[in-house]
Amino acid sequence: MRRQLGRETMERVIALINEGNYEAAFDRLTRLIEAEPSPEARAAHLLLLAELYSFYGPDGLGGLEEALLLAEESWPQIAETPLFQALATEMEAISGQTPEIFATSDPRACYHLAQVAAMQGQAGSALDCLKAAHELPPYLAWRALATRGRVLEEMEEHLRALAAYREAARLAPKNERFFLILDAAAVAVEAGQAEEGRALLLSVKDEAQSADALATWHYLLGRAELALENPNRALTAFVEAEKIEAEAGEPSYGLPLAKGQTLMQLGRYREAAEAFATAHARAPEEERTYSLHELALAELEAGDFAKAETHLKEVFADSDYPHRGAAASDLAELYYRLGDLEAARAWAEDARALGHLAGAELILGHVAFERLRYEEALEHYRRAAEVAPEGSRDWLTAQQMAADTLAQLGFPDPAEALRRAEAALAHTPPSDEWSATLSAYAKRARELLSQGRTLN
């Protein structure tokens, strides 16, 4: 009768864990451990307690260690089981050590070893461990899928990560679902599925249980709207997130950065510079050069050339910064705007040497164009159009300027002039002054082609 009562109590503990009712589960499990007369059963219950503590990462480290020690004291043979050894390995990893991952066929042990591999950045090992972690209890099954999503996200396999997060959210208890949906929405945006990301966020619109959660929800909604080319909606979401963060006293780095990027799209460059300055002040050490680069670009567009020059040179001076070529290209553009063609050419050559080809070729084209070297300018614009992503700002400028240069040369190749003018027109708003110019070039090129004009 007593054993039957114990089984029913353990079944209830497991049910509470599966439901996400951890406080009640801890309470019942603790009482069950205290009342358990069998050393072996008591040790098994303590392993479950250790497992619960492992879910809390560093915050649960003390409880995890104590539960493992008590389990081994109660029944020393427990230390030989794969689950005990996997939990001990995870404990070492959480505490900052780098333990080795061992082979086992125990599914629960494999789950915990996957956590270790993920913590150590061993993506392949983590996925292998998760593959072996089959037929897990519900409270581990959804966590395994969430871990798989996190690992795949770090590998930038965003579509596979999205599928894992979505399935994890489907299986998880309601109180765990919100942040899994946020994870799914974030990778959806990264995967180019912003519409789905927004839909996922709207599906949990009223489920945030803290100010931090609500601010994150608005931030991700803003990112989705920005990716959907709705900058005004994005800005509204970011401003709301900013208000919530300010009230909670928990300012973040990513929010003013995203707000600044949105303001740049809206052409509100001075406000963007203010947002980037805030982001730069909050940036972690590894992000400081990147945030300074964003600030410099906003200052450049706002016409604060002295500040932009100072900041861009500081960015370029960081030898570890992976976007030094872009910084050199931006300096080339700055000096071109200032009318210092020789400095612009020199920085453009540096940008080209560092692999930032589209921006470099554009500035070299502009310099040649200003010096009336139209043939040379045309070659630079052709190369810029070839290497820039279609539809990008650099690509559009290159197509526009190539068409303009061909016109300056007297339409030596009407077919090319027509092709480039029409390509640029497809991405140029009718209200843009370039629209009328390109339309005139296209009309003239068609006239020449109808007259049988060929390449000189």
Image (cartoon, helix red, strand yellow):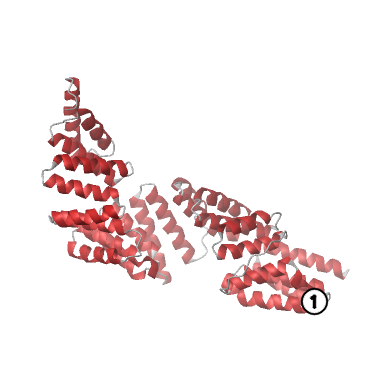
Q: Residues within 10 Å of mark 1 (few under 14, many from 20)?
A: few
Residue drawn at 16 percent across, 24 percent down? 448
Residue at (56% x, 61% y) in the render: 122
**What amino acid is at disc 1?**
Ala
Residue 65 image position (x, y, % from top left)? 66, 76
Please give the name of the residue rendered at 79% of the width and 73% of the height, measured from the top-left corner: 77
* Residue 319 or residue 422, whichever sits in front: 319
In front here: 152 or 187? 152
In the image, residue 36 above or below residue 103: below
Q: Is residue 284 visible?
A: no
Q: Secondary structure at mark 1?
A: helix
Which image quarter: residue 6?
A: bottom right
Quadrant placement of the N terminus: bottom right
* Quarter where residue 238 is shown: bottom left
Number of labelled discs?
1
Task: Place residue 35 in its image quadrant.
Answer: bottom right
Residue underneath mark 1? 35
Residue 23 horizontal/vertical position (percent)? 65, 70
Furthest residue toward top: 451
212 vs 417, nearest the viewer: 417
Q: 292 left or right of 155?
A: left
Residue 340 placement (x, y as % from top left):
13, 56
On the image, the x and y values in percent for residue 184 come to 52, 53
Q: Seen from this angle, which residue lies furthest left?
A: 372
Residue furthest toward the right? 1
